[in-house]
Amino acid sequence: MRIARFATPSGQVAFGAVEGEPGAPTDALTVAAIAEHPFGPVSFTGERWALPDVRLLAPLLPSKIVGVGKNYAEHAEEMGGEVPPAPLLFLKPPTAVIGPADAVRLPVDSQQVDYEGELAVVIGAFGARDVARERALDALLGYTVSNDVTARDQQRVDGQWTRAKGHDSFAPLGPWIETVLDPSDLAIRTTLDGEVKQDSRTSRMIHDVATLVSYVSHVMTLLPGDVILTGTPAGVGPMAPGQVVSVTVEGIGTLTNPVRSR
């Protein structure tokens, strides 16, 4: 099931199931409203809209976003560092979340803001705490697409990553959550104004999804709807106002955001 969060033409916000063939154009898709929320048995209200008639929002509003740094060897190399021996964790605030078509706003005090296309995982209804790797994927609601936007110059100056990765609009998520997916070998691609900048596969992750979920759950309790960003492949680079960045993950879809000055 593809679970979206959307605003109806009348302005109401709801969760819904996106219907139609995977990969079909937007105007061939519909969205069926879910009665309450997707964290449990799903029932439908009977209301349905053509997807172009609603506005897709970030598919959820997590209590926290846990990022993983340098989880692709090629990216660690391009950043001039070694591969960490264990997953390298950082946090992004929930206020950084934006949805499809929302603008990434570049802060006035940064001269280099980079895109970082990533697969994101969403924690399911029962949360996750001290989960064994063998059971880690059972703790997930599903998977979505993310862009771990980073003020690279601030990251270098600060020596830690909170400011560089925590600005408002620095955590685009979407376009929806895919609940049935094998994350082990998915194509992931980032384009800037249509030019391919990142082109890799999740099979190149140093620590796979199950390992990451288990590892993070032994550090902190993961609540329903929390998000783990699984790391970005090589090819990160800067964005400028007026450009458009798109991240595509095989089996999920494409997350597109324009870039604007704040």
Image (cartoon, grey):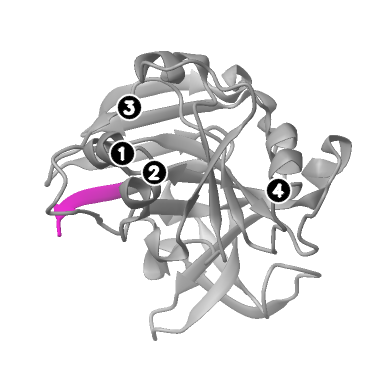
Q: For the magenta stretch, what is the residue range?
A: 257-262
Check disc 4 and give the amino acid type. Val
Q: CA distance from mark 2 to mark 1?
A: 5 Å
Residue drawn at 82 percent across, 49 percent down: 130
- What residue is pinned by disc 2? 161
Query: Relative to residue 203, is residue 215 drawn left or right?
Result: right
Determine crowd level at label 3: few under 14, some 14-19, many 20+ residues with C-alpha closer than 10 A.
Answer: many
Determine crowd level at label 2: few under 14, some 14-19, many 20+ residues with C-alpha closer than 10 A.
Answer: some
Check disc 3 and give the amino acid type. Val
- What residue is pinned by disc 4? 219
Disc with the residue nearer the chain's start (4 vs 3): 4
Q: Secondary structure at mark 3?
A: loop
Q: Secondary structure at mark 4?
A: loop
Check disc 1 and give the amino acid type. Gln
- What residue is pinned by disc 3? 236
Disc with the residue nearer the chain's start (4 vs 2): 2
Front: mark 3 or 2: 2
Task: Tell me if label 4 and label 3 are in contact, CB under 8 Å.
Answer: no
Q: CA distance from mark 4 to mark 2?
A: 18 Å
Residue 227 visible in this rendered orientation of the protein: yes
Front: mark 1 or 3: 1
How far across and down, in percent of the image, does residue 256 sit? 34, 46
Image vertical order of residue 185 relative to residue 3, above or below:
above
Disc with the residue nearer the chain's start (3 vs 2): 2
Determine crowd level at label 1: few under 14, some 14-19, many 20+ residues with C-alpha closer than 10 A.
Answer: some
